[in-house]
Image (tube, helix red, strand yellow):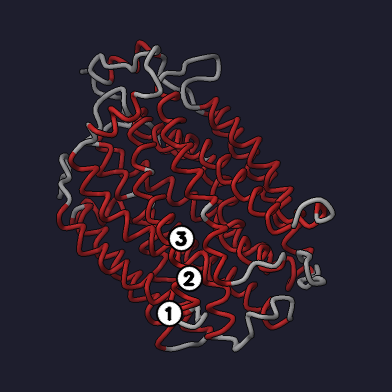
């Protein structure tokens, strides 16, 4: 098998640039979807049910996109056609999401919003999955950690701006941050419009700057193995049954990590509104509640900014102490950060907590993929990166089904306990990293 050539730093950044736009869209969704749905009438018990739209679409879409992207080659390339298709659809959904109320005369806006959330997440998944596979396609083993760390940094940058934008438009530009009941504030609406532009622009950058290996060259770099173009969609189930041992081991780590993240994304706004601001979640149109919602955007900005910076250091740290140990320490620190919000309910502590969450987030976005890529057989990068998404979306689905009722009925709608559960799950995830086999890890 011919060794893949090393790529320049510029080439690595260019091929991952689209992730900046992808995460810009995700950040707007993560920080504002609960707020939008609550404005349309959703209560805290049902929030996680509406958020099921995201992981369910990921469960279905990513393996299918991975399967077909392994078998695609046209004028655009192998992975790039999916980048572009997903970007166009996601940008349209970003424009419609905060305007769901305009259709209230025909369908309850809450259900329109949930439907658009599903479309938006499916579209983002169409773009995102091939980016993971592209790093495995293009980079030799010794550059994989760098490649996934570059993606994590760009994810962090996109998420910083996406999370902070509603707060910035409200507090710095003076755009209205409140709206009548049943409507979304202007600062959120304009943020989603801007996100749509950034999404499509960064995807186009990657398309213009990245040249994929054609089929013959791709086969030489993967031991002559190339996916059968006539392969059936049912091959997904065969590949799932034959998944590498390392993927199964990482699955347990991913379960606890993404169960925690889902809790944080869904319940941060009501948790901070209640526990830190003392606001009532029964009046989501109040200025105090919207101040809390804007502050959650600031919190998410902090953890994403820290993630972007820490991701640059991950290749160095992992080279010294190993990818597994790096990931375990980062997850544990993130868990302790979330627990601290419950222990000391103050705005300052929430920002300190988000620093530690940022360390965990950077590692979650890079270390599992860097470990996994070395265990995937040639010609199967797309499908196995798609199947690996099962271990991301299944914990979110479990949380989505049981999380809302658990918080309402067991914890009397005190959403801060969702963050406590998230912190504990990250610490458990850190412990399970020890059981993962990293086949080609080299520690200096």
Residue shown at the point (25%, 37%) measured from the top left = 142
Secondary element under disc 1, as helix, strand or loop, is helix
The residue under label 2 is 405
Quadrant where the image shows the N terminus: top left
Instruction: Indicate which disc, 1 or 3, sits on the residue closer to the N terminus.
Output: 3
- As displayed, is residue 19 above or below residue 5? below
Return the x and y of residue 310 as percentages of the image width and height: 38, 60
Return the x and y of residue 366 as percentages of the image width and height: 35, 49
In 3D space, how far apart are the residues under numbered discs 1 and 3 (Cα atoms)?
A: 15 Å
Return the x and y of residue 386 as percentages of the image width and height: 39, 36
Instruction: Indicate which disc, 2 or 1, sits on the residue closer to the N terminus.
Output: 2
Return the x and y of residue 415 as percentages of the image width and height: 50, 77
The residue under label 1 is 410
In 3D space, how far apart are the residues under numbered discs 3 and 2 (Cα atoms)?
A: 8 Å
Secondary element under disc 3, as helix, strand or loop, is helix
Q: Quadrant of residue 50?
A: bottom right
Q: How many marks?
A: 3
In the orientation shown, which residue stands out farthest toward the right? Answer: 105
């Amino acid at each position: 098998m011919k060794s893949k050539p090393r790529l320049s730093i510029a080439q690595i950044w260019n091929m991952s640039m689209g992730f900046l736009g992808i995460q810009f869209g995700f950040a707007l969704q993560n920080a504002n979807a609960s707020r939008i749905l609550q404005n349309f009438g959703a209560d805290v018990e049902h929030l996680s049910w509406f958020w099921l739209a995201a992981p369910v679409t990921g469960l279905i879409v990513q393996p299918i996109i991975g399967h077909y992207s392994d078998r695609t080659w046209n004028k655009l390339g192998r992975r790039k056609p999916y980048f572009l298709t997903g970007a166009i659809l996601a940008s349209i959904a970003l424009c419609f999401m905060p305007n769901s109320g305009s259709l209230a005369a025909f369908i309850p806006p809450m259900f329109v919003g949930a439907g658009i959330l599903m479309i938006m997440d499916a579209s983002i998944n169409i773009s995102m999955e091939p980016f993971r596979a592209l790093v495995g396609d293009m980079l030799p083993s010794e550059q994989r950690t760098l490649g996934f760390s570059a993606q994590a940094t760009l994810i962090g940058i996109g998420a910083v701006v996406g999370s902070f934008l509603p707060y910035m438009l409200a507090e710095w530009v003076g755009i209205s941050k409140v709206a009548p009941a049943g409507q979304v504030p202007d600062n959120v609406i304009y943020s989603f419009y801007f996100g749509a532009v950034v999404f499509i622009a960064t995807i186009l950058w990657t398309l213009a700057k990245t040249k994929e290996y054609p089929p013959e060259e791709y086969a030489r770099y993967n031991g002559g193995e190339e996916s059968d173009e006539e392969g059936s969609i049912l091959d997904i189930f065969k590949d799932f049954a034959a998944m590498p041992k390392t993927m199964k081991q990482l699955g347990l780590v991913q379960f606890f990590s993404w169960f925690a993240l889902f809790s944080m994304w869904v319940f941060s706004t009501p948790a901070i509104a209640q526990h830190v601001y003392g606001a009532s979640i029964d009046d989501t149109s109040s200025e105090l509640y919207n101040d809390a919602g804007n502050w959650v955007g600031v919190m998410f900005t902090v953890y994403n900014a820290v993630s972007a910076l820490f991701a640059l250091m991950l290749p160095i740290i992992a080279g010294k102490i190993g990818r597994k140990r790096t990931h375990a320490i980062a997850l544990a620190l993130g868990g302790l950060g979330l627990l601290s919000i419950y222990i000391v309910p103050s705005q300052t502590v929430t920002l300190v907590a988000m620093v530690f969450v940022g360390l965990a987030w950077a590692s979650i976005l890079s270390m599992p993929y860097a470990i996994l890529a070395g265990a995937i057989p040639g010609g199967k990068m797309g499908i196995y990166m798609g199947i690996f998404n099962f271990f991301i979306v299944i914990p979110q689905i479990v949380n989505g089904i049981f999380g809302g009722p658990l918080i309402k009925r067991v914890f009397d709608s005190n959403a801060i306990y969702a963050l406590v559960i998230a912190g504990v799950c990250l610490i458990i995830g850190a412990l399970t990293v020890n059981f993962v086999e990293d086949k080609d890890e080299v520690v200096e």
